[in-house]
Image: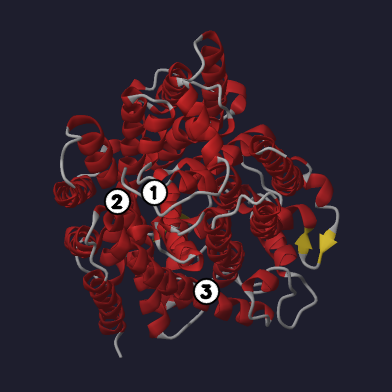
């Protein structure tokens, strides 16, 4: 693979990962915490209504997880395509 | 020991630490002054970013907002954390790869235009100055409430401290003091929360306590709170929405985009060594932020329940005014609580009905400030809360001031007017710019303009509608050119400012709000504070359309974009 094709493939893989994770980001905050909050509130998580829990707790834990998953996967991609910092 | 003395000692110790750090971490070069030499460990930068980000508003006011809005307060929780996901994936690693000192510098280079750089500087300065006024007020208020010195005196002391470590240490001094400030503020926030959670639910972890049963009962805390507030006529805590679902959605999006576009947060990621560090550092920053942000809803619900149950204990008659606890009296003297015995029965009625409600003023800030007293915690905890509030305000103020100073000395002076100055002259200029920025912020703190109340929302609106889209398109599109970027930024800001001004008044002068601040006049029911996301959409659309109609960017710019997309080849950050 030429270096230009290699870079293009790397960027494509990066964008694909990003879109997947941004979908999760959107689901846990905008869908679970805002749009479908009433429906989810019928389910309980201990003392929490589930929709309320997503809005005031769960979404934030999810955000942290998303960033660390992204950082780890990207570090792996950097190496796979040999584009990491030396 | 007396509370007053204790507070002076605790605050004094923290201030001594900040000044000590300033002299230990002096900046000797422009690289150290602007980006702390680019050698900060990702975890350390995460901690500094958390302190940089969490302002007096996060520390003092946010739990109060949630306590009174209930579910409706979630906008701030999701909005002020979700932006870090965008920052980590869309901006931070690429801007770190580019390896320059400021945000306008990237915009100027990517769009090969001094005009674009100047537009970015203007957006940065307006957003940061409006934001810093709130911090200055926070410093003055924290001093006057906890140390009983005057607002002006408190402000002067706070400015003096920032002056020492920001002018001497630049970004390097600010970074290490922010780390110390994070430790102070997170202890001050979580310790009272742990005790209150333990008292109410027997669970020491507030995040779990909020979902637990009340001690000695089979009732969940949130169910009990819902019952108490609805009996008094307030909206149910766990479901009470603010305005429409669409508004909640757009407001959350505006705060997220705004967070990712605020220059004082972005430049923190220029200080780490590698591109991969920038990604992981955003994760650490969000962990440190989330510790406070997931504790806040617990503090909010528990403080609200405590407040209602103190005034109207279950199964008993309401509290007799003359028998009110000492914290009630203390906060009455500050004017944050106000009681008026409307039915002359000597007891306190606190209801949602305006005619019979006797708690005529319950300031939101009381939820955090009075928390340790309501929970009867020892005096040293109260002293710590004072130090924590000051740490939150000082750390954010310093970060904002650095963003302003570097835009003036590096982007305007070195970048546009006097490119031929030496590094030594530029370092001196940056120190003078810093001192000037502190003086301006102090002046605005002493004479808060009429529009001060609405300004933080304006800062988010500007960052969301101008800086974020320009940066993102600069990285993700090779086709967006100079004309498109400038037109997009100008259109984005104009739409946002027009919308805010027509409803809130030109520069927030109420009489000039020609459409009135009335919800029927809002575009699709979106409140002015939430409009940044709409401005951002306008920016994207205009930038794309104009770019398509004009020539594509020159070849070397397209190579530049290709280059910042891959981590390989990043050297240490360089001046030029």
Comes first in the chain, label 2 or label 1: 1
Classify B65 as above or below B464.
Answer: below
Residue at left offset 22%, top offset 42%: B409
* Labels 2, 1: one chain: yes
Tags 2 and 1 touching, CB below 8 Å: yes
Q: Residues within 10 Å of mark 2 (few under 14, many from 20)?
A: many
Q: Chain of mark 3?
A: B
Q: Position of residue B509 (x, y in %)?
A: 31, 29
Q: Residue beneath label 3, please?
A: B190
Residue at the far front: name it: A2
Classify A6 as above or below B489.
Answer: below
Residue at left offset 24%, top offset 35%: B412
**Which one is in front, B67 or A58?**
A58
Circle on res. B264: 1
Q: Position of residue B134 (x, y in %)?
A: 34, 49
Residue at left offset 71%, top offset 50%: B239
Q: How far apart, in angstroms, are the residues tagged by discs 3 and 2?
A: 29 Å
Q: Chain of mark 2?
A: B
Q: Nearer the viewer, mark 3 or mark 1?
A: 1
Q: Residue beneath label 2, please?
A: B402
* Labels 3, 2: one chain: yes
Comes first in the chain, label 3 or label 2: 3
């Amino acid at each position: 693979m030429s270096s230009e094709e290699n870079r293009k493939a790397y960027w494509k893989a990066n964008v694909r990962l990003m879109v997947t994770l941004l979908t999760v980001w959107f689901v846990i905050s905008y869908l679970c915490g805002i749009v479908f909050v009433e429906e989810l509130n019928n389910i309980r998580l201990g003392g929490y209504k589930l929709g309320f829990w997503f809005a005031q707790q769960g979404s934030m834990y999810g955000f942290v997880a998303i960033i660390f998953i992204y950082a780890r996967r990207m570090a792996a991609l950097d190496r796979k395509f040999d584009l990491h910092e030396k | 020991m007396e509370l007053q003395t204790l507070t002076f000692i605790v605050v004094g110790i923290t201030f001594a630490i900040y000044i000590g750090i300033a002299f230990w971490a002096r900046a000797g070069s422009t690289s150290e002054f602007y980006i702390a030499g680019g050698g900060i460990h990702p975890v350390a930068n995460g901690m500094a970013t958390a302190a940089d980000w969490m302002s007096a508003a996060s520390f003092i006011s946010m739990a109060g907002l949630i306590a009174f809005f209930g579910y409706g307060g979630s906008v701030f929780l999701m909005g002020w954390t979700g932006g870090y996901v965008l920052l980590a994936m869309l901006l931070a690693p690429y801007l770190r790869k580019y390896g320059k000192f400021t945000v306008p510098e990237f915009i100027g280079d990517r769009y090969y235009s001094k005009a674009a750089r100047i537009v970015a500087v203007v957006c940065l300065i307006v957003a940061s100055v409006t934001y810093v006024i709130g911090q200055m007020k926070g410093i003055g208020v924290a001093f006057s409430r906890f140390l009983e010195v005057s607002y002006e005196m408190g402000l002067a002391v706070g400015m003096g401290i920032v002056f020492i470590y920001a002018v001497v240490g630049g970004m390097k001094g600010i970074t290490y003091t922010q780390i110390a400030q994070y430790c102070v503020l997170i202890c001050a926030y979580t310790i009272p929360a742990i005790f209150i959670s333990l008292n109410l639910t027997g669970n020491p972890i507030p995040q779990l306590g909020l979902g637990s049963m009340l001690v000695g009962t089979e009732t969940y805390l949130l169910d009990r709170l819902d019952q108490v507030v609805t009996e008094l006529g307030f909206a149910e805590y766990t479901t009470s929405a603010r305005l429409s679902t669409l508004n909640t959605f757009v407001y959350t999006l505006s705060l997220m985009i705004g967070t990712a576009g605020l220059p004082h947060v972005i430049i923190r990621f220029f200080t780490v060594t590698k591109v991969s560090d920038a990604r992981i550092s955003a994760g650490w920053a969000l962990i440190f932020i989330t510790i406070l942000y997931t504790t806040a809803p617990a503090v909010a619900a528990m403080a609200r329940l405590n407040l209602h149950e103190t005034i109207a204990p279950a199964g008993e008659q309401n509290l007799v005014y003359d028998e009110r606890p000492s914290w009630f009296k203390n906060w009455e003297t500050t004017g944050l609580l106000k009681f008026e015995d409307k039915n002359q029965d000597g007891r306190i009625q606190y209801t949602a009905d305006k005619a019979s409600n006797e708690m005529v003023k319950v300031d939101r800030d009381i939820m955090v400030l009075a928390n340790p007293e309501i929970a009867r915690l020892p005096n040293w905890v109260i002293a710590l809360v004072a130090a924590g509030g000051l740490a939150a305000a000082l750390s954010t103020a310093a970060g904002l001031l650095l963003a302003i100073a570097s835009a003036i000395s590096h982007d305007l002076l070195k970048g546009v007017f006097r490119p031929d100055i030496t590094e030594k002259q530029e370092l001196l200029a940056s120190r003078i710019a810093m001192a000037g920025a502190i003086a301006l912020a102090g002046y605005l703190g002493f004479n808060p303009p009429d529009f001060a109340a609405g300004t933080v929302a304006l800062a988010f609106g500007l960052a969301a509608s101008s800086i974020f889209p320009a940066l993102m398109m600069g990285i993700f599109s090779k086709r967006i050119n100079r004309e498109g970027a400038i037109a997009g930024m100008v259109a984005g800001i104009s739409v946002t400012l027009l919308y805010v001004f027509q409803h809130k008044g030109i520069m927030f002068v109420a009489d000039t709000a020609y459409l009135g601040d009335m919800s029927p006049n809002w575009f699709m029911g979106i409140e002015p504070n939430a409009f940044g996301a709409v401005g951002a959409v306008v920016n994207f659309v205009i930038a794309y359309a104009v770019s398509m109609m004009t020539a594509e960017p020159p070849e070397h710019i397209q190579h530049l974009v290709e280059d910042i997309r891959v981590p390989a080849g990043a050297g240490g950050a360089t001046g030029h």
